[in-house]
Image (spheres, helix red, strand yellow):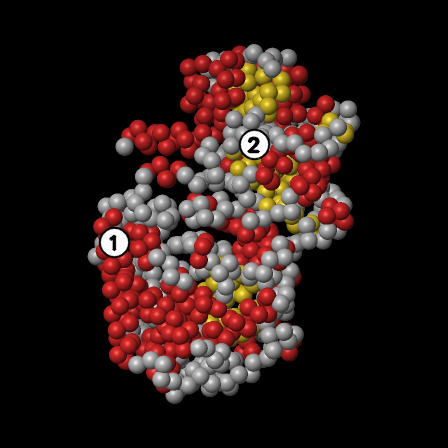
Amino acid sequence: MSNRAKLSLYVPEPNARPGGQPSFEHFEIPAAGAVRCPDFGAPEHEMRDLPYTLIRVLDEESRAVGAWNPKLPHDTMIKGLRAMMLTRAFDDRLFRAHRQGKTSFYMKSTGEEAIGAAQSLVLDQGDMCFPTYRVLSWLMARGYPLSDLVNQIFNNAQDPLQGRQLPILYSARDYGFYSLSGNVGSRFGHAVGWAMASAYSEDDKIALGYIGEGTTAEGDFHEALTFASVYHAPVILCVTNNQWAISSYAGIAGADETTFAAKAIGYGIPGLRVDGNDFLAVWAATEWAAERARSNRGATLIEFFTYRAEGHSTSDDPTKYRPADEPSAWPLGDPVDRLKRHLIAIGAWDEERHVSLAAELDAAVRAAVKEAEAIGTLGKSKPPVEQMFECVFKEPDWRLIEQRREVEASS
Amino acid sequence: MTSMNMVQSLNSALDVMLERDPKVLTFGEDVGYFGGVFRVTDKLQSKHGLKRCFDAPISEGGIIATAIGMGAYGLRPVPEIQFADYILPAFDQLVSEAARLRYRSGGEFCAPITVRSPYGGGIFGGQTHSQSPEAIFAHITGLKTVIPSNPYDAKGLLIAAIECDDPVIFLEPKRLYNGPFDGRHDQQVKSWAGHPDAEVPDGYYTVPLGKAAVVREGEAVTVLAYGTMVHVALAGIEDSGVDAELIDLRSIVPLDIDTIVESVKRTGRCVILHEASRYGGFGGELSALVQERCFHWLEAPVERVAGWDTPYPHAFEWDYFPGPQRLATALKKVMQD
């Protein structure tokens, strides 16, 4: 044996496990309005402080403060609030539908609704987002038909994806919403390629890609950043850091060593770190990055610091790996509640209207579920079986035609 | 008509399509200014501009991911993977994304990309520059896999692949780039000059995907081959003295099953030849199809001649490579059965 010290393998662990005391005290959270807002056209090397702080607009008194305040009209904020509330109402109703055996799978985006809602409203029709499975609020903000969502979740005869996809892995081209997949991260580079194609075509559209903090460990993340950087792609690359990748806390993806926004520094593109539960901060950062992209200044990486308030999916029980009361200890609050309180504080909203809107949205969701149930829930109704063989190729080859006939003959 | 080798005819296909369709662009490692390590994209950048033909980072996953995004936007990208041996970092993109995008999105999005990649051995490239991975792509539904065997087909098939709305894996037998190699490695290297299939139209034409070519008509046995093995098969048939019919599949997805079945029913015998290793190779699928569809016409078991089930061995290249002698032996064997 040498005289050298023995090496020791370090495996990171979260602050608290079930039965423990949840604590987020190790997070440095600057006051709302404290972070400077550089010109969107400024060179990246002048903004390397931004990945290590946290852009926040809504303060503890529910005021919108500081240089990042987007100063939105009341009706725009109410539109955002509505999209978030609709997402939550839908999630609650469809999660229950799963528990009632009406579908096989569901995933909620509780606590993360501000991100998709604000970004959907900031970007233009014709821009394209490359979503993760927790960006339902993007579609809600753009008025995607609720019954089509439920039909997809039930895989019934009216499923817009013809029964080929797991519930909630939507595709909605006309709503700027790229096809989802259950493989995480593999569309991040598509956002960059799509943006490169827009620039190649001298178009004015930009792309927006999402990835979870856990998935930043995949090669896809780094490949996408490399291409975005090299070709100055007009794309906004977003890491939704909701602290948990199923049961792995963000430290397993490297969060204890640096921030996810700071990964941008290695690629020479701006990195913003943003309070993801603050609708106005999400809005402002997205608008900033969009203007940068639209003016041929290339990509921005934005880390949205947020919290997955519920389980990963209907197949997950988060109390098995984190304290049951951890969600209530999250220091950045709830995005719906924070925007609601701001609207009330500025006199644009009140409890009564809030309650009545919640009731209206819940009724709309219930009506959509009822409509879809009338067509059929999972297993009770499905698209014609020949749809199984369509869209494998543009035109089916002889194998698919023969196999389709075989299925038809036996059914 | 111009006499072209396969590098020149592939270059011509790209040139024609860059000229014809502003949605076509090509990129990959060393593809731009330099024109590709095998020169297939030579002078395309200076002729068509930096944005139509450019260098990519050494990131096969990134190359294919961005190409899929471009395809989803509406372009027709033709990414190059420098060697088929390097395609595996992009495998997830090809399998989970390119092949599935149309299906899972209900036809809202598709990836009309053509992934060009030099493949196959016979060039003393060792394990990392010689492999034949076509079977792993054939197994992935949603991908088309095309393998030309001569300059004329290479150009026509590449244009058809670029115009195809589905993702296409376009494997270029690199040993055929400069001449029709028949596996007789100890003989003088031949060039394409004077070969009838090296007479290539200068302009636009297509060779349809999924249509095999009967390269040699015969009555005794059907030989199925593609890529370099088409030329090896001709030599093996000559050596054996057997009156074999040789079918060049040209694409393995889609597969021209009708031409195969018609021929085997007529000859009653079938030998399959491929360079890739044998176990789980595409020859297994071909053998099963022939057996399923021609069983009552078969007079002998279907034979497979293929690379051995080892990694591609540098010093043992010609022991590994299924040359004309091995085919000739198989042909004689099926004739005795």
Residue A248 drawn above or below residue A46:
above
User: Which percent across, then down, holds residue B131?
Assistant: 61, 39
* Dot 2 and dot 1 within a common chain: no
User: Which percent across, then down, holds residue A230?
Assistant: 65, 61
Q: Quadrant of residue B234?
A: top right
Chain ID of residue with mark 1: A
Of labels 2 and 1, the one closer to you: 1
Quadrant of the image containing the C terminus of chain A = top left
Residue A11 drawn above or below residue A34:
above
Is residue A225 at all visible to an observer of this figure? no
The structure residue drawn at horizontal position 45% and vertical position 48%, both measured from the top left corner, is B108
The structure residue drawn at horizontal position 44% and vertical position 77%, both measured from the top left corner, is A73
Total marks in image: 2
Q: Is residue B170 toward the left or the right of residue A11 in the image? A: right
Three-letter amino acid code at disc 2? Leu
- Label of residue B209 in the image: 2
Chain ID of residue with mark 2: B
| Residue farthest toward the bottom in the current orientation of the protein | A61
Element marked by disc 1:
helix
Element marked by disc 2:
loop
- Label of residue A371 in the image: 1
Is residue B259 at all visible to an observer of this figure? yes
Q: Quadrant of residue A201?
A: bottom right
Q: Quadrant of residue B316?
A: top right
Task: Compare residues A225 and A194 and report the one nearer the observer.
Answer: A194
Task: Compare residues A268 and A335 and report the one nearer the observer.
Answer: A335
